[in-house]
Image: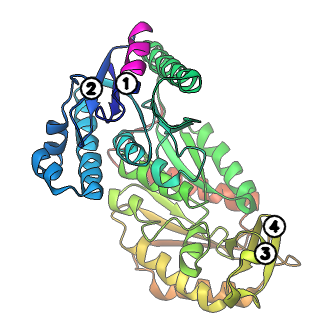
Amino acid sequence: MAVLLIGTLDTKGTEVAYIRDQLLAAGVPVLVADVGVIGPPAFAPDISRESIFSAAGANYEQVKAAGDRGHAIARAAAGIAQVALRLYGEGKITGILSLGGSAGTTIGTAAMRALPVGVPKLMVSTLASGPVQHYVGTRDILMMYSVVDIAGINRISRSVFDNAAAAMAGMVQAKARRASVEVVDRPVIAATMFGVTTPCVETARGILEAAGYEVLVFHATGTGGRTMEGLIRDGLIAGVLDITTTELADELAGGILSAGPDRLTAAGLKGIPQVVSLGALDMVNFGPRDTVPDRYKHRRLYQHNPNVTLMRTTPQEMDRLGKEIAEKTSAARGPTCVMIPLLGVSALDAAGQPFWWPEANAALLQSLRNWLAPHVEVVELDYHINDPAFAQACANKLLALLQATPGLPRPG
């Protein structure tokens, strides 16, 4: 299998050719894809720009004639994503390497995001030293800063390109060696954790792992929740221990750790067992204290550290969160249980702690009771979320749901 090397061969042909030659010298086969649109390619690619635009339902000549750079980039990105997915499905590529500026990074990372976690992905970009979340998304993309613009081979760019080629060669060759070793994979459970729910999740994880499952723990920081939902949609997850649903609070109140409106939906759509709890719904996350929106300055705030300010959710917000959780879990196609810790939902939500507010939690619980469908199992326990007994109850409930659901992978 080959590395898919993506570049605009009209403007970056020399640089693409240099990296191609370094990969070939390392014994790595290469397929070069040309995503240029301005002028003729510097050399003949393995995958033409015409076929890439066609994969996006566009005609290359028409796109070129239109002279709309934004539209051309969007079509190239959509096309190369489809091409990469097809080549991977056919077993023809084992990794992706791309290089470019803003356009090249948009196009190259679109192909990378189309492929599963575990496939080597390396983007050499002039933008890699800045915010890259838009490019990386929820995939394991390695961003390498080009230091200088990608404009010729010089003492700086040569060093960067050499390292990029060596890194990609190392990744795909190591992947090939791993593939030759027989590994018995255990069924996978996804779990969500925050610092204020860590004791609960760690205890539950130990129980699930002892039962033969592999547990992937996702930090509920927005990206973590989106990544988990994506892996569930990809069919990699057998069950979900969604202890920490705090990202819903950030989405509701405009915090910085929102996972978007689709949080808490993938497991339900897939029909896999899920145990859902209320971890850290008592808080919304902001940056340093001076970044808290003016409309919230009067609210109950807690300085977690110099870079993180937490805001306590009100009874009104908790009421809305309860309804949202009820609606989403009630729509699930698979077995679902909502586990309720009656003595607090985070380390800060306990008697004597900064976010202890029984009236707010009561609003959350009453909303759940009002809106949950009868077929959703609800377990209310007189424990704090971080009590070992609550963690044990959550883990054992998920194990019971997994065992009762036909067609799921079982521990060996």
Quick check: 82 above or below 183?
below
Few, some or many C-alpha atoms within 10 Å of disc 2 (few <14, some 14-19, many ≥20)?
Answer: some
Instruction: Mark 4 vs mark 1: give the one in front.
Output: 1
Which is more toward the observer, 150 or 96? 150
Q: Which residue in the structure is indicated by mark 1?
A: 14
Residue at 71% from the left image edge and 66% from the top image edge: 385
Q: Position of residue 161 (x, y in %)?
A: 51, 24
- Label 2 and label 4: CA atoms lie apart by 54 Å
Q: Which residue in the structure is indicated by mark 2?
A: 42
Marks 4 and 1 close (CB-CB < 8 Å): no
- Label 1 and label 2: CA atoms lie apart by 7 Å
Which is more toward the observer, 305 or 247? 305
Marks 1 and 2 close (CB-CB < 8 Å): yes
- Label 4 and label 1: CA atoms lie apart by 50 Å
Few, some or many C-alpha atoms within 10 Å of disc 1 (few <14, some 14-19, many ≥20)?
Answer: some
Few, some or many C-alpha atoms within 10 Å of disc 3 (few <14, some 14-19, many ≥20)?
Answer: some
Residue at 34% from the left image edge and 41% from the top image edge: 111
Quarter of the picture holding the N terminus:
top left
Q: Position of residue 408 (x, y in %)?
A: 37, 44
The residue type indicated by label 3 comes to Arg
Q: Disc number at residue 289?
A: 3
State the SS at label 1: helix
Q: Which residue in the structure is indicated by mark 4?
A: 304
Magenta-colored span: 17-25
Instruction: Mark 2 vs mark 4: give the one in front.
Output: 2
Quick check: 225 above or below 154?
below
1 or 3: tag closer to the N-terminus: 1
Tell me if 57 is positioned left or right of 344 in this view: left
The residue type indicated by label 1 comes to Thr
State the SS at label 3: helix
4 or 3: tag closer to the N-terminus: 3
